[in-house]
Image (spheres, rainbow, N blue to C red):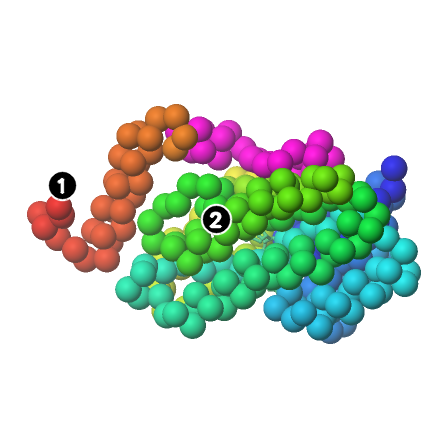
């Protein structure tokens, strides 16, 4: 059945790949992103508008468009996001503010804006793209991890809160895959960001493959979509074999400290 879909960050990476899949199968899609002009990459037949997820004004305008043109909405995908990486004493608080505004408040604004319409309809689905980083929290990426954990918490909360209105909420938690996400790194911790760039640009999975997995989870209306074996393993290890998880994370923290020039002889046990 054709669905009416509003998707943020639709001009690149996972968002664009989802837009293509949804358009191919006959969904009506409104893709939104930062560019004023319609990007060439957006497929024919897909609507495009500028929407900065930081702007409540932009959200209100998109909702007005959806009400006027479609008279309702079946699916909101809060996909837009940026990457940050940084050790707590190196990354600037202004970088924290920027990533919270986009990755966490951007998602909250989307949910806040469309929920009255979905409640009126007594139907609909909200999909929030978090990350595996929202479930397992490795060292050196506190700001990104915190925003994505916030998205996981927001999604779980709404999955309960909105269920009496027949509204489903899904949170998507992928590990690294190849997109343009690394281009959004901006901040003071160059060493951490270098590692992040490598993990994204050298990931095995590309955005198109990831989008197929994600869409499968969306269609099944899963509460959490874990997209690969690595993610499932990491999440289950944290829940059911905590000492193993702690050892792996501590080893990672020591590698990071060594790279940052701290003498291993000075490490506390
Ligand atoms: N690529 C990965 O390894 C990875 C892993 C886990 C989760 N994610 C998440 O997947 C989502 C999509 O990222 P991607 O990897 O496709 O990256 P991408 O950079 O290719 O796409 C992100 C899109 O979001 C848009 N965007 C950024 N700030 C915005 C704003 N303020 N308002 C509106 N749009 C904005 C960008 O213009 C871009 O088109 C993000 O939430 C990201 O955190 C990515």
The quadrant of the picture occupied by the C terminus is: top left
For the stretch drawn in magenta, the main secondary structure is helix
Residue 118: percent from left, percent from top: 78, 50
> Residue at 28% of width from left, 30% of height from top?
243
Q: Quadrant of residue 71?
A: bottom right
Residue 129: percent from left, percent from top: 60, 48
Disc 2: CA contacts within 10 A as few (<14), some (14-19) or many (>=20): many
208 or 165, nearer to the observer: 165
For numbered disc 1, what is the local secondary structure? loop
3 or 262, nearer to the observer: 3
Q: Is residue 190 left or right of residue 107?
A: left
The residue pinned by badge 1 equals 269
Residue 88: percent from left, percent from top: 31, 61
The label on residue 149 is 2
Q: Is residue 195 left or right of residue 257?
A: right
> Residue at 48% of width from left, 35% of height from top?
231
Give the extent of the magenta segment. 212-237
Q: Is residue 183 visible?
A: no
Disc 1: CA contacts within 10 A as few (<14), some (14-19) or many (>=20): few
Cα distance in 3D space between marks 1 and 2: 28 Å
Foreground: disc 1 or disc 2: 2
For numbered disc 2, what is the local secondary structure? helix
Farthest top residue in view: 240
């Amino acid at each position: 059945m054709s669905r009416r879909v509003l998707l943020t960050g639709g001009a690149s990476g996972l968002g664009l790949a989802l837009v293509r899949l949804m358009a191919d199968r006959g969904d009506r899609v409104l893709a939104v992103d930062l560019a004023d002009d319609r990007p060439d990459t957006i497929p024919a037949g897909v609507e495009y508008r500028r929407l900065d997820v930081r702007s409540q004004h932009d959200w209100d305008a998109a909702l007005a468009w959806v009400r006027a043109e479609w008279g309702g909405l079946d699916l909101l995908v809060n996909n837009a996001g940026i990457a940050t990486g940084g050790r707590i004493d190196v990354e600037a608080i202004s970088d924290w503010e920027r990533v919270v505004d986009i990755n966490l408040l951007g998602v909250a604004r989307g949910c806040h804006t469309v929920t009255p319409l979905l409640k009126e309809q007594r139907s609909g689905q909200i999909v929030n793209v978090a990350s595996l980083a929202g479930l397992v929290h490795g060292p050196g990426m506190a700001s990104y991890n915190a925003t994505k954990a916030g998205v996981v918490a927001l999604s779980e909360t709404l999955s309960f809160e909105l269920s009496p209105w027949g509204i489903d909420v899904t949170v998507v938690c992928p590990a690294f895959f190849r997109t343009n996400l690394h281009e959004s790194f901006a901040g003071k911790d160059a060493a951490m960001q270098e590692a992040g760039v490598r993990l994204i640009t050298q990931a095995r999975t590309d955005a198109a493959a990831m989008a197929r997995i994600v869409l499968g989870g969306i269609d099944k209306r899963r509460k959490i979509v874990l997209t690969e074996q690595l993610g499932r393993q990491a999440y289950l290890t944290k829940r059911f074999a905590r000492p193993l998880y702690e050892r792996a994370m501590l080893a990672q923290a020591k590698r990071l400290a060594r790279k940052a020039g701290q003498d291993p002889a000075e490490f506390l046990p």
